[in-house]
Image: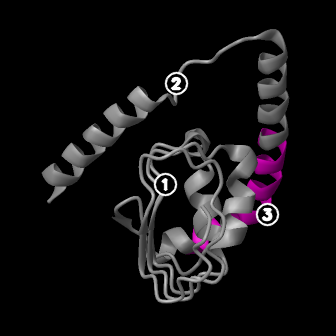
Amino acid sequence: MEGLSKLKELEYLNLAVNSVKVVEGIKRCESLEKLDMTLNFIDVEDLEQSVDEMEYCENLVELYFTGNPCTEWKGCRNYILGRLPQIMRFDGDDVTKSERIQAKAMLPQLEIELAELAEKTVAKKEYNEKEGIVESGYKREDRWNMYVEDQERKKAKE
């Protein structure tokens, strides 16, 4: 994600189904309201950095993160909502006031949990790389199938 910092009037950024590993370069996108990061490669070890970047986008009210490895962590949604109180819609669902309050209350524990999980994930990836182990999942084909399913789900919801 490069060259976005000059797009001060950018309101919607769709980077769905790419190979993005971390959200970066959007700090100066002052007008950004909607960010679609569906089906990328954002994992737990890069989630904190990605959310740090999105905190600068005060107008960001709609965020899509479906299909990223970090969403397998059960605390992902609450962590993001606890850190980004301006989000009104997450992965196509409205964020309720009670959900936002709960996420904010859980945030200190979620930050500890995320740090521990990120450390374990990095260690596992390093071990797998050292041993030549290739894990399945989050390949281009898998992501495309997930995207098609997600689009069908959205159409059915409408």
* Kind of residue sitting beneath label 2: Gly
In percent of width and height, residue 50 lies at 67, 61
The residues colored magenta run 101-117
Q: Residue at x 57, y 49 (%)?
A: 20
The local secondary structure at tag 1 comes to loop
Q: Does the magenta stretch mainly form a helix, a strand or a loop?
A: helix
Q: Quadrant of the C terminus?
A: bottom left
* Observer able to see residue 105: no
Asked if residue 12 is positioned above or below residue 59 in the image, the reply reads above
Q: In 3D space, how far apart are the residues under numbered discs 3 and 1 (Cα atoms)?
A: 21 Å
Q: In 3D space, how far apart are the residues under numbered discs 2 and 1 (Cα atoms)?
A: 17 Å
In percent of width and height, residue 23 lies at 63, 60
Residue 131 left/right relative to 16: right
On residue 6, the disc is none
The residue at which mark 2 appears reads as 137
Quadrant of the rendered image containing residue 62? bottom left
**N-terminal of the two: label 3 or label 1?**
1
In percent of width and height, residue 136 lies at 55, 18
Q: Residue at x 66, y 76 (%)?
A: 55
Asked if residue 141 is positioned above or below residue 50 in the image, the reply reads above
The residue at which mark 1 appears reads as 65
The local secondary structure at tag 2 comes to loop
* Kind of residue sitting beneath label 1: Phe
Q: Residue at x 44, y 51 (%)?
A: 38
Q: Quadrant of the N terminus?
A: bottom right
The residue at which mark 3 appears reads as 108
The local secondary structure at tag 3 comes to helix
* Kind of residue sitting beneath label 3: Pro
Q: Is residue 111 magenta?
A: yes
